[in-house]
Image: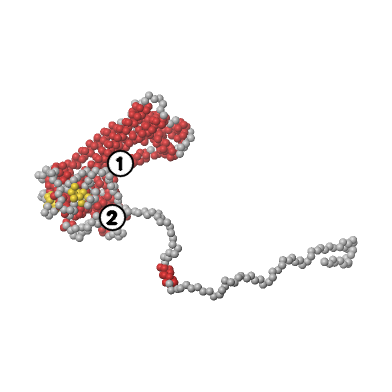
Amino acid sequence: MSLKIKKFQLNSSNLTKNIVREIIRELDDQNIKGIEKSFVEYVVDLMALNNTIDFNKSIINRSVIEEFIEKCNQKICDQSSPSTVALKMQAYFFENFIDRDEIITNYMKQMMAKTATIKKEITEAEVVTRDDQDELIKKIIIDIITKSSLGNPNDSLILTETSNALHSVMSRVDIENFIMLSKNDRVNSLIEIREIVTGIILFNQDAGNSSITLMELPQILEQSYESTKSILQITLCEIIDRINLLTSAISSAISNDFKNRQIIVLLPQNVTAEDFETVKSSLIMNRQHEIFTRKLSEFLENVKFDIDKNNHRYNEILKLIHETVQFRTAIPTEKVFPKFAELSKCWSRLQNNIYLLSEINQINNQLLQLSEKALCCDEIAYKLLGDSVIETDEERAGRFKDKKILLLGEKCTVQPYNKKIKLEYYGFCTWMLSQGRGILIPGIPDIGVVTFKNANYGFCAPDLALMFEDTPQKHMYKIIEAAKNRIELIRLLDIYDHMKSFEVHHKGSISEGVSTDLVKQTSEQEVQTELHPIPYYKDERYMWNIWDIRKKAIQLANLRKCSTRSAQTMISYQKFNVNTQANRSKMSANSQTKNESCSNTPIYGRSFEDDLSSCLEVTKLQ
């Protein structure tokens, strides 16, 4: 039985979200409390598989939406209905029962959130004085105690023990070196310090040199495992008792009509058809509860295996440390510190198993609380049972232990069952699911497994396989139709993907035996082409305009009618180039119009005033 659970994902269309909001609004108007949004989303997603609304259409009639919302409200508001309780179980289980590593990751995030503040103060604090160093040491001690779950940080004995272990690892010089580190280096160094100090405390506890008493984790885990296992076994026994009663009651009220290839329901006078449908719903709910409880039990065994493995490793590391430090006064840190760190990691893994055990108990308790809210159908079941005897699944299978399925046709094949074969519909009888409209009777693998189109089907009687062989596709479509009316079957039988990939086309009624066509299964895929797989090339002559192409075509057509000719009018190759000059070139010459000369006024002995009337002598320029 695989522990892998397909988590529910809501259709992300706006129409779906609006429908969910409107349903929640109507529930609030009706003053109906205690219904979570995730459950409403889960019901809407399953109801949408009934093909009443195409969520991919852009325009949908409002009356169709209102009818769909009304159906969803009827399903959600009937809190005591076994069908609604089964849906609540599924919604809760698929949301909370997740992968083991994911559960531990969530637990570690919770632990980190508790110490996030003090971790930030350690890695980002500015330490200047000696008092600041002492304050930083105190914060490191509290971080170690809290993160390693060594006890109460307010306990003076635990503080003293952790402080002594820390000072044996870090001196004042180491503290100063730690302060000088960057933030990321401080974080990594803090993790290493925490692991080594925790390992020292655990070793001192085992050696009897500790003043505190830590919890005996291996013993606590063993007790918790036995307690959880006992609770699950008791729960499973109670569920199986109810299943045996309901299955026997339904089996006594039905009979197989091999001539008409159908199931006949024979009800007592004091039991109505509605009561019979309620018993069927109760059986579905209890079968779902059984499946979930078995998954929890299987998960518990995996946790037990991990506990034993880590407990064995924990004792081995302690033994190695004792051998290393025995009769020695000084030991190199590179030899013993890695062992202390490994011991601390093993301690953390054991603590994670405590959280896993608590998760198992929490899920089981919630499933029990939900099952108690369902309407009890024991009284109706005893009326249906009449004088018949309650049979278990093993007793019912024992009636056919010497019989095998023998098929005469070629559509299906029969093969012996082994544990590697995966049976469709979780191993329930295909014929009962089809003709009984959702009746859950376990198949008997020992009589053989019928294979059709690479899928394996189980049956609770050999004769039922013969009737299935004639029209196997018709029975598969009938199961899909039954799941549309009982949406809790979709997840129980693990046919959610089939509901989306198969579609029933009614040219007539399926019950009349009209053949149906199988719709090809498709899925959306994303493809990323290689970036430039071909070297870039650009054709300069490429023309995208059709008119340019036509113009070029006309030119080429005209060119076909032309011929090339050569002509020579004169013998011009004998001529040479001649340089002509109209005027002679002038000689370079300098011209001077005048000679440079100077003039000087004559100097006389008398003054200018004595000879006012005299004339000035003009000097001629040569």
Closer-to-camera residue (470/78): 470
Q: At 27% across and 55% down in the image, what residue appears?
A: 521
| Dot label at residue 458 | none
Q: At 43% across and 37% down in the image, what residue appears?
A: 186
Secondary structure state at the residue bearing disc 2: loop
Instruction: Name the image quarter holding residue 605.
Output: bottom right
Closer-to-camera residue (495/22): 495
**Mark 2 — residue?**
522
287 to the left or right of 171: left
Q: How many marks?
A: 2
Q: Residue furthest bottom?
A: 569
Label 1 and label 2: CA atoms lie apart by: 32 Å
| Dot label at residue 100 | 1
Residue type at mark 2 is Thr
In primary-sequence order, the first of circles 1 and 2 is 1
Percent x, y of residue 87? 24, 48
Q: At 20% across and 44% down in the image, what residue appears?
A: 418
Say if 484 sits above or below 351 in the image: below
Residue type at mark 1 is Arg
